[in-house]
Image: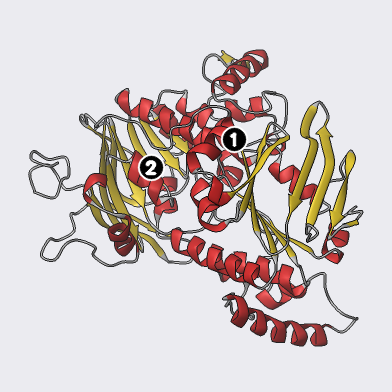
Amino acid sequence: MTEPAIELRGISKAFGPVQANRDIDLKVMPGTIHGIIGENGAGKSTLMSILYGFYKADRGTILIKGRETAIPDSQAAIAAGIGMVFQHFKLVQNFTVLENVVLGAEEGAMLRPSLAKARRLLRELADEYELEVDPDETVENLSVGHQQRVEILKALYRQADILILDEPTGVLTPAEADHLFRILRGLRDEGKTIILITHKLREIMDVTDTVSVMRRGEMLDTVGTADTSPEDLAERMVGRKVLLRVDKRPASPGAPVLEVEGLRVVDADGVERLRGIDLQVRAGEILGVAGVAGNGQSALLEVLGGISKATGTVRVNGEGIDLSGTRSDGRTRRARGIAHVPEDRHRLGLILDFAAWENTAFGYHDKAPYSSGAMMDHKAMREDTAAKMERFDVRPPDPNLPAKSFSGGNQQKIVLAREIERNPDLLLIGQPTRGVDIGAIEFIHQRIVELRDAGKAILLVSVELDEIMSLSDRIAVMFDGRIMGERLPAETSEGELGLLMAGMDGAAEGAPAPKAGDPPGTGADPLAEGAA
């Protein structure tokens, strides 16, 4: 029989009282794409970090191609033919592609021969695996999808036969994700072994040969992908049946809560990020904003959340908001009933070195029950955070742990709990389920719908088209800082939305794309009388 490319025997790892991995056994066969799934905090990333030498197991054995192999650090992993592409890329932003690929793998004191060799090999790898990228381009100028290609090229340049990818599509557009999967299939067909960590069951079904399910630090089962289904995998992951669609009744929208007219943003480099945005969100509805990342959605959320300034008109509950940045910020937005879950939880949502209870109180530390007069009540903050952690199933449920000690999905739950439980009139929410497992996605979607049904207005930004389609009551599509049009989820398709996202009118011939924010009665408002 063929030896496994990787075999793990009895791997265990604890961080203080938290048992991240418990007696894990795993076999990954060569020339396959092997998926590993599990809820946030199930121990997937910890296990792969042990395999890559970032962590040292407390006990257990690693075998590479049948041979017991010690992996005390990442250099040993690379020497064993293992490469890893992390969820948050490990690239030097102001270096070129070529310099990033060579970094740490230079041959000799003179850099020029290493760069020449890398340039030649990059050309060969690009041709063989569809990994085209300009070797002389600075990384900070590349799209996220192309930066991920650089990470894969780094691993292949170091002659990796085993490639680990941790949540590789969390920051990719659907088109970029499809291209990545073509690359992975090509690598598999050339004999490479791929380990794919993801929470997206559709991706598991589409691209893997075998899938292992982890739950609460233990390896639950390994099955052939062809022998299972998304529903079966979801139940194995969570331990109960999971609803894989959003269960919601039709919206009953009320008066406008958010009105935006002629909103424009010019950044520090003089680039116009928003080019006259008009939109409206009413009480009791979810307006989903679709678009390829970088087309103005982030700028829109940051203006509405009080992070950056703009020109134009924004009204909340009929009252104007200052956009100049001189008399308005996040604090005044919160006072007006606006809550904001930012797209980038690390940069804008959390202070990673601070405890969970401190992060839960941020922005609301001067409000009850956290404050009485001039004094903050730390005990009340910890107790309230513990209660939020229980309601939002944050793991581990320890308010004193620093935010950086939680998995990405559990970090997201901390931010969501802080903002949603303040019962805002308007919730601005960016990428609500990025890096979140299937059970938590179901929970987050339910909470968003509950907020809508309570009469709140929700502006949702997501690059996940299936999330936009299933959660939204109306969909606005952005391209190059403009609203290309609005659609009803029941009357459009991912193909039509994709055309709008690419800057092309996806409307049927002779039917102009509706303008976002058109008032009722113009024929462009999807919720006007007579609309489906």
Q: Secondary structure at mark 2?
A: strand
Q: Secondary structure at mark 1?
A: helix
Q: Quadrant of residue 349?
A: top right
Amino acid of disc 1:
Met
What residue did someone put label 1 on? 237
In this view, the residue in front, 194 or 362, is 194
Q: Quadrant of residue 411?
A: top right
In percent of the image, x 81 and y 51: which residue is there? 7
First in residue order: circle 2 vs circle 1: 1
User: 391 above or below 108?
Assistant: above
Nearer the viewer's eye, disc 2 or disc 1?
1
Q: Residues within 10 Å of mark 2 (few under 14, many from 20)?
A: many
Q: Is any atom of residue 147 visible in this view? A: no
Q: Quadrant of the N terminus?
A: bottom right
What residue did someone put label 2 on? 460
Q: Is any atom of residue 221 visible in this view? A: yes
Q: Tell me whether circle 2 and circle 1 mark residues in contact (CB < 8 Å).
A: no
User: 238 above or below 279?
Assistant: above
Where residue 317 appears, as percent x and y from the top left, is 27, 31
User: In the image, 114: left or right of 138?
Assistant: right
> Total of numbered circles in the picture?
2
User: In the image, 47: left or right of 507?
Assistant: right
In this view, the residue in front, 343 or 268, is 343
User: In the image, 285: left or right of 60?
Assistant: left
